[in-house]
Amino acid sequence: MCQLVAPGLQGGEGVRPLKDGNVDNEAYTQAEYGPQTGIRRILGLLQNQGVTATFLTCGAIAERYPDAVGAIVKNGHEIAGHGYHHEVARDLTMAQEKKVVRRTTDMIQKVAGKRPLGWRSCTQSPNSIALLMEQAYLWNSNSFSFDIPFVWKSGKQQLVELPRQPFGDGRAYGRRDSGSPQNALMIWQSSFDELYEASEKNPAFCPFQFHPYISGRPGRAKALIVQHTYGIPCDMDRVTAFARKYSLMVIEDSCHALGSRWRRLGHRPFEHRVGTADDGALLCLPEDFV
Protein backbone atom coordinates (compact mmCIF):
# COMPACT_ATOMS: atom_id res chain seq x y z
CA MET A 1 0.00 0.00 0.00
CA CYS A 2 1.17 3.52 -0.79
CA GLN A 3 0.62 6.18 1.86
CA LEU A 4 0.70 9.84 0.88
CA VAL A 5 1.53 12.57 3.41
CA ALA A 6 0.34 15.96 2.04
CA PRO A 7 0.23 18.99 4.36
CA GLY A 8 -1.65 22.00 3.01
CA LEU A 9 0.37 25.18 3.62
CA GLN A 10 -1.93 28.17 3.58
CA GLY A 11 -2.39 31.25 5.72
CA GLY A 12 -4.89 34.06 5.92
CA GLU A 13 -5.49 34.01 2.16
CA GLY A 14 -8.64 31.97 2.64
CA VAL A 15 -10.14 34.36 5.21
CA ARG A 16 -12.58 36.61 3.34
CA PRO A 17 -13.57 40.11 4.54
CA LEU A 18 -16.68 40.49 6.69
CA LYS A 19 -19.79 42.21 5.38
CA ASP A 20 -18.55 45.56 6.68
CA GLY A 21 -15.25 45.09 4.86
CA ASN A 22 -13.20 44.45 7.97
CA VAL A 23 -11.02 41.40 8.53
CA ASP A 24 -11.93 38.83 11.19
CA ASN A 25 -8.69 39.11 13.16
CA GLU A 26 -9.30 35.89 15.09
CA ALA A 27 -9.85 33.81 11.95
CA TYR A 28 -6.97 35.51 10.12
CA THR A 29 -4.37 35.06 12.86
CA GLN A 30 -5.42 31.45 13.44
CA ALA A 31 -4.79 30.74 9.76
CA GLU A 32 -1.47 32.61 9.87
CA TYR A 33 -0.32 30.26 12.63
CA GLY A 34 0.48 27.72 9.89
CA PRO A 35 3.27 29.53 8.03
CA GLN A 36 4.33 31.52 11.10
CA THR A 37 4.65 28.75 13.69
CA GLY A 38 3.00 25.43 12.87
CA ILE A 39 5.22 24.72 9.87
CA ARG A 40 8.30 24.55 12.10
CA ARG A 41 6.70 21.98 14.37
CA ILE A 42 5.50 19.89 11.39
CA LEU A 43 8.92 19.96 9.74
CA GLY A 44 10.50 18.84 13.00
CA LEU A 45 8.08 15.93 13.34
CA LEU A 46 8.66 14.82 9.74
CA GLN A 47 12.42 15.03 10.20
CA ASN A 48 12.31 13.00 13.41
CA GLN A 49 10.21 10.33 11.67
CA GLY A 50 12.33 10.33 8.51
CA VAL A 51 9.30 11.13 6.34
CA THR A 52 9.29 13.04 3.05
CA ALA A 53 6.04 14.88 2.34
CA THR A 54 4.41 17.00 -0.35
CA PHE A 55 3.46 20.49 0.83
CA LEU A 56 0.48 21.91 -1.06
CA THR A 57 1.49 25.57 -1.03
CA CYS A 58 -0.33 28.77 -1.96
CA GLY A 59 1.64 31.12 -4.21
CA ALA A 60 1.06 34.01 -1.79
CA ILE A 61 2.57 31.92 1.02
CA ALA A 62 5.69 31.39 -1.07
CA GLU A 63 5.78 35.13 -1.70
CA ARG A 64 5.21 36.17 1.93
CA TYR A 65 7.09 33.36 3.67
CA PRO A 66 10.09 32.45 1.49
CA ASP A 67 12.04 31.24 4.53
CA ALA A 68 9.34 28.68 5.36
CA VAL A 69 9.30 27.43 1.76
CA GLY A 70 13.10 27.33 1.79
CA ALA A 71 13.04 25.19 4.93
CA ILE A 72 10.60 22.78 3.29
CA VAL A 73 12.85 22.40 0.25
CA LYS A 74 16.00 22.15 2.38
CA ASN A 75 14.46 19.23 4.26
CA GLY A 76 13.89 17.37 0.99
CA HIS A 77 10.13 17.83 0.67
CA GLU A 78 8.16 18.55 -2.48
CA ILE A 79 6.30 21.82 -3.10
CA ALA A 80 3.01 21.60 -5.02
CA GLY A 81 0.59 24.34 -6.08
CA HIS A 82 -2.49 25.21 -4.03
CA GLY A 83 -3.81 28.32 -5.74
CA TYR A 84 -2.39 31.78 -5.14
CA HIS A 85 -4.75 33.23 -2.54
CA HIS A 86 -6.53 29.91 -1.88
CA GLU A 87 -9.12 30.89 -4.51
CA VAL A 88 -12.34 28.92 -4.92
CA ALA A 89 -11.63 27.63 -8.43
CA ARG A 90 -15.24 26.97 -9.35
CA ASP A 91 -15.98 30.69 -8.88
CA LEU A 92 -13.35 31.73 -11.44
CA THR A 93 -13.64 32.18 -15.18
CA MET A 94 -11.30 30.08 -17.29
CA ALA A 95 -9.09 33.13 -17.92
CA GLN A 96 -8.95 33.94 -14.20
CA GLU A 97 -8.09 30.39 -13.23
CA LYS A 98 -5.42 30.21 -15.92
CA LYS A 99 -3.84 33.35 -14.47
CA VAL A 100 -3.92 31.83 -10.97
CA VAL A 101 -2.18 28.64 -12.14
CA ARG A 102 0.51 30.56 -14.03
CA ARG A 103 1.09 33.05 -11.22
CA THR A 104 1.34 30.32 -8.60
CA THR A 105 3.67 28.25 -10.77
CA ASP A 106 5.98 31.19 -11.40
CA MET A 107 6.11 32.27 -7.75
CA ILE A 108 6.86 28.79 -6.41
CA GLN A 109 9.54 28.31 -9.05
CA LYS A 110 11.09 31.63 -8.08
CA VAL A 111 11.12 30.91 -4.35
CA ALA A 112 11.64 27.13 -4.27
CA GLY A 113 14.07 26.96 -7.15
CA LYS A 114 11.98 24.51 -9.16
CA ARG A 115 8.50 24.61 -10.64
CA PRO A 116 5.69 22.63 -9.01
CA LEU A 117 4.53 19.52 -10.84
CA GLY A 118 1.46 18.82 -8.71
CA TRP A 119 -1.69 20.77 -7.87
CA ARG A 120 -4.65 20.82 -5.53
CA SER A 121 -7.24 23.58 -5.77
CA CYS A 122 -9.64 24.87 -3.20
CA THR A 123 -12.42 22.99 -5.03
CA GLN A 124 -12.11 22.40 -8.77
CA SER A 125 -13.70 23.99 -11.81
CA PRO A 126 -14.79 22.40 -15.11
CA ASN A 127 -11.63 23.97 -16.60
CA SER A 128 -9.06 22.81 -14.05
CA ILE A 129 -7.99 19.56 -15.73
CA ALA A 130 -7.48 21.15 -19.15
CA LEU A 131 -5.56 24.09 -17.65
CA LEU A 132 -3.22 21.85 -15.66
CA MET A 133 -2.54 19.76 -18.75
CA GLU A 134 -1.82 22.93 -20.70
CA GLN A 135 0.65 24.03 -18.02
CA ALA A 136 2.42 20.62 -18.15
CA TYR A 137 1.48 19.54 -14.64
CA LEU A 138 2.16 15.92 -13.76
CA TRP A 139 -0.56 15.33 -11.19
CA ASN A 140 -3.74 16.75 -9.70
CA SER A 141 -5.36 15.89 -6.35
CA ASN A 142 -8.95 17.06 -6.18
CA SER A 143 -11.18 14.04 -6.81
CA PHE A 144 -13.04 12.15 -4.09
CA SER A 145 -14.50 9.63 -6.56
CA PHE A 146 -12.04 6.74 -6.27
CA ASP A 147 -9.79 5.04 -3.74
CA ILE A 148 -6.91 4.56 -6.17
CA PRO A 149 -5.04 6.92 -8.52
CA PHE A 150 -6.13 7.20 -12.13
CA VAL A 151 -5.12 9.11 -15.25
CA TRP A 152 -6.87 11.88 -17.14
CA LYS A 153 -6.17 11.77 -20.88
CA SER A 154 -6.90 14.24 -23.64
CA GLY A 155 -5.25 13.35 -26.93
CA LYS A 156 -1.58 12.87 -26.11
CA GLN A 157 -1.84 14.77 -22.84
CA GLN A 158 -2.10 12.97 -19.52
CA LEU A 159 -2.64 14.08 -15.94
CA VAL A 160 -2.40 11.73 -12.97
CA GLU A 161 -5.16 12.11 -10.39
CA LEU A 162 -4.21 11.31 -6.80
CA PRO A 163 -7.63 11.02 -5.12
CA ARG A 164 -8.50 12.39 -1.72
CA GLN A 165 -10.46 11.10 1.24
CA PRO A 166 -12.73 13.52 3.19
CA PHE A 167 -11.00 12.79 6.48
CA GLY A 168 -8.43 15.58 6.73
CA ASP A 169 -7.92 17.59 9.89
CA GLY A 170 -10.32 20.32 8.73
CA ARG A 171 -13.21 17.89 9.06
CA ALA A 172 -11.76 15.65 11.74
CA TYR A 173 -11.61 18.60 14.10
CA GLY A 174 -14.96 20.00 12.98
CA ARG A 175 -13.61 23.53 13.22
CA ARG A 176 -10.04 24.74 13.42
CA ASP A 177 -10.46 25.46 17.17
CA SER A 178 -12.61 22.50 18.25
CA GLY A 179 -12.42 18.71 18.33
CA SER A 180 -9.87 16.46 19.99
CA PRO A 181 -6.66 14.75 18.82
CA GLN A 182 -8.02 11.44 20.12
CA ASN A 183 -11.08 11.60 17.85
CA ALA A 184 -9.00 12.72 14.87
CA LEU A 185 -6.56 9.88 15.41
CA MET A 186 -9.43 7.38 15.65
CA ILE A 187 -10.73 8.53 12.23
CA TRP A 188 -7.30 8.33 10.61
CA GLN A 189 -6.45 4.94 12.07
CA SER A 190 -9.81 3.47 11.08
CA SER A 191 -9.33 4.65 7.50
CA PHE A 192 -5.82 3.27 7.37
CA ASP A 193 -6.88 -0.07 8.90
CA GLU A 194 -9.49 -0.74 6.24
CA LEU A 195 -7.27 0.25 3.33
CA TYR A 196 -4.33 -1.74 4.68
CA GLU A 197 -6.53 -4.79 5.12
CA ALA A 198 -7.77 -4.39 1.54
CA SER A 199 -4.17 -4.18 0.30
CA GLU A 200 -3.77 -7.87 1.12
CA LYS A 201 -5.59 -8.61 -2.14
CA ASN A 202 -5.47 -5.43 -4.23
CA PRO A 203 -3.33 -2.31 -4.50
CA ALA A 204 -4.35 0.40 -2.05
CA PHE A 205 -3.65 4.09 -1.72
CA CYS A 206 -3.96 5.95 1.60
CA PRO A 207 -3.84 9.76 1.32
CA PHE A 208 -3.30 11.70 4.52
CA GLN A 209 -3.85 15.45 4.39
CA PHE A 210 -3.59 18.00 7.16
CA HIS A 211 -2.73 21.66 7.73
CA PRO A 212 0.04 23.17 9.86
CA TYR A 213 -2.38 25.86 11.08
CA ILE A 214 -4.71 23.16 12.43
CA SER A 215 -2.59 20.11 13.27
CA GLY A 216 0.57 22.08 14.03
CA ARG A 217 -0.92 23.28 17.33
CA PRO A 218 0.42 21.89 20.64
CA GLY A 219 -1.55 18.82 21.66
CA ARG A 220 -2.62 18.01 18.12
CA ALA A 221 0.82 17.51 16.61
CA LYS A 222 1.39 14.35 18.65
CA ALA A 223 -1.55 12.71 16.87
CA LEU A 224 0.43 13.11 13.65
CA ILE A 225 3.37 11.22 15.12
CA VAL A 226 1.15 8.35 16.22
CA GLN A 227 -0.73 8.38 12.91
CA HIS A 228 2.42 8.21 10.84
CA THR A 229 4.08 5.55 13.00
CA TYR A 230 0.87 3.56 12.82
CA GLY A 231 0.56 4.13 9.10
CA ILE A 232 3.97 2.86 8.02
CA PRO A 233 4.12 -0.96 7.98
CA CYS A 234 7.20 -2.22 9.80
CA ASP A 235 7.57 -5.40 7.73
CA MET A 236 8.97 -3.88 4.52
CA ASP A 237 9.76 -7.32 3.10
CA ARG A 238 6.05 -8.08 3.17
CA VAL A 239 5.19 -4.77 1.52
CA THR A 240 7.86 -5.25 -1.15
CA ALA A 241 6.57 -8.74 -1.94
CA PHE A 242 3.06 -7.34 -2.24
CA ALA A 243 4.26 -4.58 -4.58
CA ARG A 244 6.10 -7.02 -6.83
CA LYS A 245 3.02 -9.22 -7.04
CA TYR A 246 1.10 -6.34 -8.57
CA SER A 247 4.05 -4.93 -10.55
CA LEU A 248 3.99 -1.77 -8.44
CA MET A 249 6.78 0.30 -6.98
CA VAL A 250 7.01 0.72 -3.22
CA ILE A 251 6.68 4.49 -2.88
CA GLU A 252 8.19 6.13 0.16
CA ASP A 253 8.74 9.71 -0.88
CA SER A 254 6.72 12.39 -2.67
CA CYS A 255 3.68 12.77 -4.88
CA HIS A 256 6.04 13.44 -7.77
CA ALA A 257 7.45 9.93 -7.63
CA LEU A 258 4.02 8.45 -7.01
CA GLY A 259 2.51 10.40 -9.88
CA SER A 260 5.28 9.29 -12.22
CA ARG A 261 4.65 5.66 -11.39
CA TRP A 262 0.88 5.85 -11.78
CA ARG A 263 1.26 7.66 -15.09
CA ARG A 264 3.19 4.66 -16.38
CA LEU A 265 0.40 2.38 -15.15
CA GLY A 266 -2.30 4.48 -16.81
CA HIS A 267 -2.08 3.06 -20.32
CA ARG A 268 -4.50 0.22 -19.63
CA PRO A 269 -7.39 -0.14 -22.08
CA PHE A 270 -10.24 0.54 -19.64
CA GLU A 271 -11.43 4.09 -20.12
CA HIS A 272 -14.62 6.11 -20.30
CA ARG A 273 -15.53 9.69 -21.11
CA VAL A 274 -16.29 12.12 -18.34
CA GLY A 275 -18.06 15.45 -18.51
CA THR A 276 -15.81 17.62 -16.37
CA ALA A 277 -13.43 18.72 -19.11
CA ASP A 278 -14.63 20.72 -22.08
CA ASP A 279 -12.14 19.08 -24.41
CA GLY A 280 -13.51 15.57 -23.82
CA ALA A 281 -10.85 14.31 -21.45
CA LEU A 282 -10.79 10.59 -20.79
CA LEU A 283 -10.62 8.97 -17.40
CA CYS A 284 -8.33 5.93 -17.50
CA LEU A 285 -8.05 3.33 -14.77
CA PRO A 286 -5.45 0.57 -14.69
CA GLU A 287 -7.27 -2.67 -15.56
CA ASP A 288 -6.13 -4.25 -12.28
CA PHE A 289 -8.42 -1.87 -10.40
CA VAL A 290 -11.65 -2.16 -12.43
Image: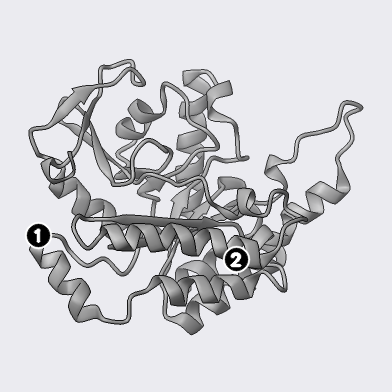
The residue that disc 1 covers is: 247
Q: Residues within 10 Å of mark 2 (few under 14, many from 20)?
A: some
Residue 17 occupies quadrant: top right
Quadrant where the N terminus sits is bottom left
Q: Is residue 130 left or right of residue 122?
A: left
x, y percentage for residue 282? 22, 25
Task: Inspect the image, locate mark 1, and give the three-letter code of the amino acid beneath it.
Answer: Ser
x, y percentage for residue 172? 62, 53
Q: Which mark is residue 37?
A: none
Q: Nearer the viewer, residue 263 or 183?
A: 183
Give above or below for 143 relative to 249: above
Residue depicted at x 56% and y 47%: 58
Residue depicted at x 56% and y 57%: 210
The residue that disc 2 covers is: 68
Q: Secondary structure at mark 2?
A: helix
Q: Is residue 77 left or right of residue 133?
A: right
x, y percentage for residue 236? 24, 79
Give above or below for 261 relative to 92: below
Residue depicted at x 51% and y 61%: 188
Residue depicted at x 66% and y 66%: 181
Give above or below for 260 relative to 282: below
Q: Is residue 228 left or right of residue 287?
A: right
Q: Is residue 84 left or right of residue 5?
A: right
Residue 229 occupies quadrant: bottom left
Q: In the rendered image, is residue 208 in sight?
A: yes
What is the number of callouts on the image? 2
Task: Inspect the image, locate mark 2, and give the three-letter code of the amino acid beneath it.
Answer: Ala
